């Protein structure tokens, strides 16, 4: 079994982390219980490219118990936890990842994982799928399909589909109700502030927080910032989202205005250059910037670096950029997803739903992938309902059922 990890001796703390999250992931536990016996993935090879921390590791082991041969890589250089990677190797999974890998190493890792010749891939952000369409087209004939974890990856898939170049079926796991309604909103909302607070050890109450993007992640970030006592400003380019933010009770203004008054800036757009030189030039002394969007392009770090007199790390995951006029600006987690690069990512209970979506999407692909057309697909809605029912059950929450009369009244009978 081939793997490339930092240090196998770190495994015990990785196992402890996986054991902890297991207790809070009942949807995944239900899948494990059933499919470790029936082993529907027997003979199937899978490559999983995701933030390599405990919840991802737990999902990878469940695919293994269900019969698959699994190779895992990280989806971001700073989100891999080396102890978890080591524990996964001990679970009999191929792992190619270490914390702080270079771009070159990242590409080596993806290639090594792909060398197992996957039937199914799970991607996060689109780099793996990109590789399958460029340098690893040799693997296309054997591939059934895959699923994509995040908004940015789905955007890339849809662009490929529009050009008629997407070569296999991909399920947009991100676009399943059981994913974005909870993961993007409540998961990102909580874990982003966890990352910022544990990194800075500063108070949020009373600060002016500027949130760029009022999509699902931005809504979560804004909701939690308000709960922490911040004054929240939203910046948007979509007029409908902007009205939503206004009626949700937030200030809305262009970034050029917000840049002058913010204490903490958080980008959550999936777009690039949200904060750039003209904003750095007017920010207050001490302003902090963090990104929770998928790629580290939302804050223009080359412009920040070039426009600063000096920069240095002043505390773990905080880089200080001294401006020519003496103002100090702070960048958290090198502009990478702050909830994962400076924290442990989403809460386990949330990832239970997201990875439930991934697990059942993979099962769907395995059963029906060969008949599915090339292109981007939604996960079938009945799977959302199944996952939601398992989750409600685990929470001890029961709900009403439609009577036969009500179904008829609603035209559902
Ligand atoms: P979304 O599409 O729901 O929202 C993005 C919003 O940003 C949209 O409302 C859009 O109008 C706005 N926007 C685009 N350009 C803008 C600009 N120049 N200025 C202001 N607003 C702008 O996407 P979602 O699901 O909220 O995801 C956002 C990003 O977060 C993506 O990169 C996604 O992959 C990533 N993500 C990160 C997670 C994490 O753990 N940190 C979890 C889930 C998603």
Image (tube, grey):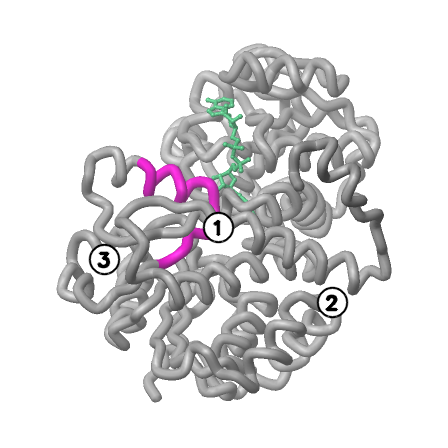
Q: Nearer the viewer, residue 235 or 145?
A: 145
User: In the visual, does 144 lie left or right of 333?
Assistant: left
Residue 361 image position (x, y, % from top left): 47, 59
Q: CA distance from mark 1 to mark 2?
A: 24 Å
- Determine the secondary structure under disc 2: loop
Kindly identify the residue that appears in the image at 72 percent across and 46 percent down.
197
Please, is residue 141 above or below residue 254 in the view? below
Q: Which residue is mark 2?
A: 24
- Determine the secondary structure under disc 1: loop
Mark sitting on residue 379: 1
In the rendered picture of this protein, how many numbered marks are placed on residues? 3
3 or 1: mark nearer the eye: 1
User: What segment is highlighted magenta in the picture?
Assistant: 146-158
The stretch drawn in magenta includes residue 148: yes
Mark sitting on residue 132: 3
The earlier-in-sequence mark between 3 and 1 is: 3
User: In the visual, does 185 lie left or right of 47?
Assistant: right
Mark 3 and mark 2 residues within 8 Å of each other at the beta carbon: no
């Amino acid at each position: 079994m081939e793997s490339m990890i930092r240090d196998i001796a770190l495994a015990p703390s990785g196992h402890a982390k996986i054991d902890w999250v297991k207790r809070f992931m009942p949807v995944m536990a239900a899948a494990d219980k059933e499919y470790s016996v029936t082993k529907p993935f027997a003979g199937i090879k899978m490559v999983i490219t995701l933030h390599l921390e405990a919840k991802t590791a737990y999902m990878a082991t469940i695919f293994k118990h269900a019969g698959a041969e699994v190779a895992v890589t990280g989806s971001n250089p700073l989100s891999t936890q080396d102890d978890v990677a080591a524990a996964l190797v001990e679970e009999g999974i191929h792992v190619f990842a270490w914390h702080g890998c270079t771009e070159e190493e990242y590409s080596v890792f993806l290639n090594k994982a792909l060398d197992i010749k996957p039937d199914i891939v799970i991607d996060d952000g689109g780099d793996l799928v990109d590789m399958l369409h460029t340098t690893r087209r040799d693997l296309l004939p054997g591939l059934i399909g895959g699923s994509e974890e995040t908004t940015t990856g789905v955007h890339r898939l849809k662009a490929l589909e529009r050009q008629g170049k997407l070569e296999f079926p991909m399920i947009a796991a991100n676009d399943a109700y059981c994913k974005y309604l909870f993961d993007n909103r409540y998961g990102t909302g909580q874990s982003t502030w966890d990352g910022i607070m544990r990194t800075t050890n500063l108070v949020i109450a009373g600060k002016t927080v500027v949130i760029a993007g009022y999509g699902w992640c931005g809504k979560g970030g804004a909701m939690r910032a308000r709960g922490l006592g911040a004054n929240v400003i939203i910046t948007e380019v979509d007029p409908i989202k902007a009205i939503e933010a206004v009626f949700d009770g937030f200030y809305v203004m262009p970034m050029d205005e917000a840049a002058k008054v913010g204490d903490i800036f958080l980008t959550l757009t999936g777009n690039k250059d949200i904060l750039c030189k003209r904003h750095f030039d007017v920010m207050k002394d001490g302003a902090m910037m963090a990104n929770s969007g998928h790629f580290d392009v939302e804050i223009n770090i080359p412009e920040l670096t070039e426009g600063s007199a000096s920069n240095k790390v002043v505390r773990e995951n905080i880089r200080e950029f001294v401006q020519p006029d003496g103002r100090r600006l702070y960048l958290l987690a090198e502009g990478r997803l702050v909830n994962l690069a400076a924290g442990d990512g989403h809460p386990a209970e949330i990832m239970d739903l997201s990875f439930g979506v991934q697990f059942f999407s993979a099962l769907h692909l395995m059963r029906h992938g060969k008949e599915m057309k090339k292109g981007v697909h939604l996960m079938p809605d009945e799977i959302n309902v199944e996952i939601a029912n398992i989750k409600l059950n685990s929470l001890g929450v029961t709900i009403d059922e439609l009577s036969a009369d009500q179904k008829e009244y609603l035209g559902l009978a």
